[in-house]
Image: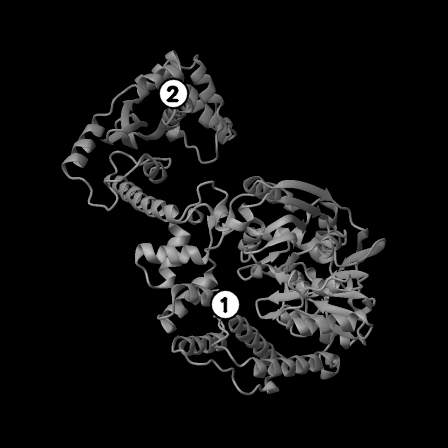
Amino acid sequence: MATSQEREQWTHGEIVAGARRSLLAELELDATELGQAFVESPIGPRVRVGGVRAGLARFAAERVAEVGAGLRYGGYTDASDEVTLQLPAQVAVRAGLALPVLAELPLKLIPFVTDVAVRGAAAVSADLLGRKSPGTREVERRLRATPPGYAGWEILAAEDVARAFAPPPPLLGDRKDLYHRIRLACTYAVDRTLLDNLARLNPGFVDYLQCFPVARSLPRKVVAWLGPTNSGKTHRAVLALAAAKSGMYLGPLRLLALEQRDRLAELGTACSLITGEERDVQSETHSARTVEMTDFSRRFEVCVLDEMQLTFDRDRGWAWVAAYCGVAADTLIVTGPASAEPVIRRLAGLCGDAVEVHHLARQGTLAYEGVIDWRRVPPRSAVIGFSRAMVLELKAMFESCGLRVSVIYGGLSPEVRRNEARRFREGESDIVCATDAIGLGLNLPLDRVIFYETDKFDGEINRPLTDAELMQIAGRAGRGPGSDGWVAAFSTRDGRRIEAALAEPQRTPEAEQLPAAPTQMHVRAIANHLQLDRLAPILEFFRTRLTFPDGTFFPDVQEDVFAAAELVDTYAPTLPVEQRYALACTPIDLDEHLFRSVFSEWLELLAAGKQVKFPRRLDGHGGLEELEEALKLITIYRWLALKFPEAFTDGAHVEELRRDATEQTQAILRRNWGKQGMARRECSHCGRALLPSSPYRVCRECHLEGWG
């Protein structure tokens, strides 16, 4: 007999195991394979001694369920000492159509467990699956006597039931869930017949690839140049484009399109520049475009699709998917990191393209330099922050140290960014302070990239940069064959992240479903068949009810397009739905009150058939932020002027304002902000540079760790 002191020394696991052995001995199952397996099964911290009987019920039921397709454990009732199993059953609706359900079957614990222990789980499972559930007959009788009044009941098909009754199916006794699934299946049936009718009118409605008939009419060869930054992939692609009789360059930024247009001109090939806000036509055969401006109507000898990894971008990925699937080119040249290869091969397989993949190595070294003293930043360096405010404060901080600074961030117009890059390139500034906008579209003579921090706010949360994002930015250092590039940080914590990213090969994203945006054809077809006049419900139907059969694509409508659609429906309801969809795609931030107000006013004028004038004067007294807002508004007006030239006729005035705003912005950025009294500070714990606006005596990381 164990003493009380000895019992106190028993562990929780030993106590529960002892209770299990006692129960099995009582049931005379301790010598069976089932009993031994139950005793040896894991004992979690939440397993109670009083729950051993329920534990045995679950253990035996789950062994039966493992070998019985569709069988599930339903629970244990202590009062009646019963285990409930859920058996797969069918409720016949009509000939050839049945609803899958789960019928509950209560069994006394001791006979059930004994049967499993003696005959084995497979034999018990086979017997259970052979049983007929009397409850199904009652439900069948009820459905025949009072059919559901849902639209689609009469045309319900097996594929609709399979979608609505996806595992786990509803319990036969749960009438609420059962009828919810029936109603969902009827909705799918209505959608299916509607989509079948739409597909008969236009095969591209549900077959995304057929939205691009010119591309589908010719065999394409895909050449992929894949590698890290400074591997020469874009250079090779542009050389092939320059040698072709006709072609397009497609990139993520106006700045990149402008740069490649200039490179083609240097190679002796005239090239047009076509972006959302401008058309500078210099050639009928070659053009450099932002990817959203892809021409799907013409056949080209060569097309270059740059930065293919942006297929995975949550906001703009649809544009790369459309460009890849829809470009009618004899040779489609795709560039990007090695991580883009799976999605390229997957899309090539769907489109029937022949694929040729070339992997390139970096033309020079890229190495971690260590933690740099912020007071001694060498020339030809880029310091990376992740907000406009941070970049401008970094400018002031480094200028107070005697450095000349260029700045680059997304809010600046392309002209200003290009001029800031020129200042750095020509030695008018020593360093450049930039956001991650530097990661695409700007080739600068940088020796090193220094991260002020390695976290960024992505619009939803403040998160660490991924390794791919770190490498995209870090790769700006050491451009050109044989050059050495260095990456550094201002803190040990960020340095460890950078060093790890440099050591790790880039992970390959899973090529799962890819975003497909609605076309004008989709919008018009849905409007006609559903007799809908408002754009927002049409887009909602596309996003929530449309399915692309092969499972590669999913219907995607961005939230900002939905917000703009509501505004367009309100202020321009009389315009054709195709025009309203074009307006909803305007690149505008409607969270900004100024932009929302002006856009609403422009919509009313457009709907009334009046000319839309730009505000007559530009007041720059509000400083840099007001100038940036003015340039954004100018960009929006120019974008709309290309879509609706008969209404947005104030082009000459807008161009004059754009030049004035650009010059004023450049003048502000050329000033030495370090003379404006912005104090230099550093973290009292780790010595890292502090921005002048920091509310703490320590940096953010030290503050989060409890210092200061």
| Left or right of 371, for residue 85 | left
Q: Residues within 10 Å of mark 1 (few under 14, many from 20)?
A: some
Q: Amino acid at mark 2?
A: Leu
How many numbered discs, if any?
2
**Which of the pair 19/588 is nearer the observer?**
588
- In the depicted structure, whether residue 160 falls above or below residue 563: above
Mark 1–mark 2 CB contact (< 8 Å): no
| Left or right of 76, for residue 549 | right
- In the depicted structure, whether residue 467 falls above or below residue 34: below
Mark identifier at residue 586: 1
Residue 401: image quadrant is bottom right
- In the depicted structure, whether residue 41 falls above or below residue 703: above
Q: Residue 168: x and y, percent?
A: 36, 35
| Farthest left residue in view | 145
Q: Secondary structure at mark 1?
A: loop
Work out whether residue 9 can be spotted: yes
Q: Amino acid at mark 1?
A: Thr
Q: Residues within 10 Å of mark 2 (few under 14, many from 20)?
A: some
Q: Label 2 belongs to which residue?
A: 23
| Left or right of 188, for residue 510 | right
Q: Which residue shows up at 48% across the image and 29% down it?
A: 43
**Which of the pair 648/93 is nearer the observer?**
648
Q: Residue 417: x and y, percent?
A: 69, 71
Q: Residue 608: x and y, percent?
A: 38, 78
Q: Which residue shows up at 35% across the image and 58% down it?
A: 527
Q: Earlier in the sequence, mark 1 or mark 2?
A: 2
Q: Secondary structure at mark 2?
A: helix
